Image (spheres, rainbow, N blue to C red):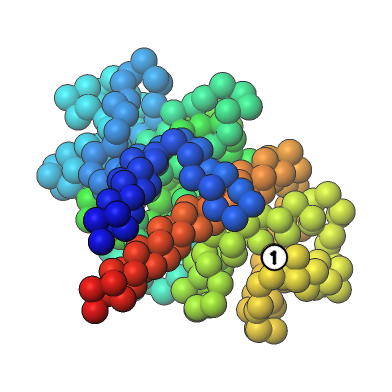
Amino acid sequence: MKKIVKPLVGALLAAAMLSSSVTVGAGTVTGTIEQQDAGESTSQITAADKPYLSLGADLTEDQKATVLSLMGVDASQLDQYDVVYVTNSEEHSYLDSYIASSEIGSRSLSSVVIVKKDSGSGLDIQTKNISFCTEGMYQNACATAGITDADIVVAGPTSISGTAALVGIFKAYSEMTGQEIPEDIIDGALNELVVTGRLEDSISNVDGEDLESLIAYLKQQMVENGLDDEEGIQDAVDAACEEYDISLTDEEKAQIVDLLLKLSKLNLDADTINKAQKLLDSLTSVTDSGSQIGTFFANLWKAISDFFQNLFG
């Protein structure tokens, strides 16, 4: 009995100690995964980073302290930062066409910090206390608006949808670059954010990150191939669904077609769209690998449990 159990325990300990490389199927994932609680930002932002803040105009002092902490901003040095405020009326003016007024609410709470990075750095987006909008959704919408090379943290004082935060991102980014984002671009990006979120909520058989990658890929196809008519875009949507192995109803496809028709009328930057598509695809691949690792260890544990049950049962 001991001859059987001892090697097995040793194997279990060895498996538990593995952290630098795990092989799953034909792929290998290397490195360690560091988990972070949904609390304060792990990096402290200072005035030297030249951050631009957009704060909800209706935050109480306690709520402001909460979001600043979540974003890694030192509240005692707030006067050294460039700060803009987003009002509830601004949120309604941009979002009333797409979201019920009751969902937008009567208080502006979403807050954003943006740090400009070197050219080619890409976008890095984190969310804190945001329940509806994902980082991928913000990534896509920012790409539509031509926002590149920045670290962005979106935060709420408590759990909020985060839809209105995109208004703050655009406002802070315009202050940072000195360039106004055209109103039609803002409208298209907000429309994209809402449509993607609604689809993610309603489609149970499709992972949200896969859907975000699909939207990014379709925008890439649209700008690269000059798609601007309903038939061409419909064909592209059908082909993309097959490419990504995503099953959508005709109504769901129609929502994407309508969105792309609208975006096709805008002068979107092809390079920015391409970078966003590649980033979202890479993030999806990493997530899929992590899921495979979790499944591997779950199956391993089940096999071990079954072994002992058969051994001692």
Residue at 53% over, 67% down = 207
Residue 1, placed above or below residue 51: below
Residue at 31% over, 76% down = 310
- Residue 257, picture quadrant: bottom right
Q: Position of residue 102 (x, y in %)?
A: 33, 73
Q: Is 195 left, or right, of 220 in this rendering? A: left
Q: Residue furthest left?
A: 62
Quarter of the image that includes the N terminus: bottom left
The amino acid type found where label 1 is placed reads Tyr
- Residue 311, picture quadrant: bottom left
Number of dots carrying numbers? 1
Residue 45, placed above or below residue 21: above
Residue at 67% over, 40% down = 275
Q: Is 140 left, or right, of 33 in this rendering? A: right
Residue at 51% over, 32% down = 150
- In this figure, which residue is indicated by the disc labeled 1? 244
Helix, strand or loop at label 1? It is: loop
Q: Residues within 10 Å of mark 1 (few under 14, many from 20)?
A: few
Q: Is 75 left, or right, of 179 in this rendering? A: left
> Between residues 250 and 141, which one lies in front from this camera angle?
250
Q: Position of residue 96 (x, y in %)?
A: 46, 67
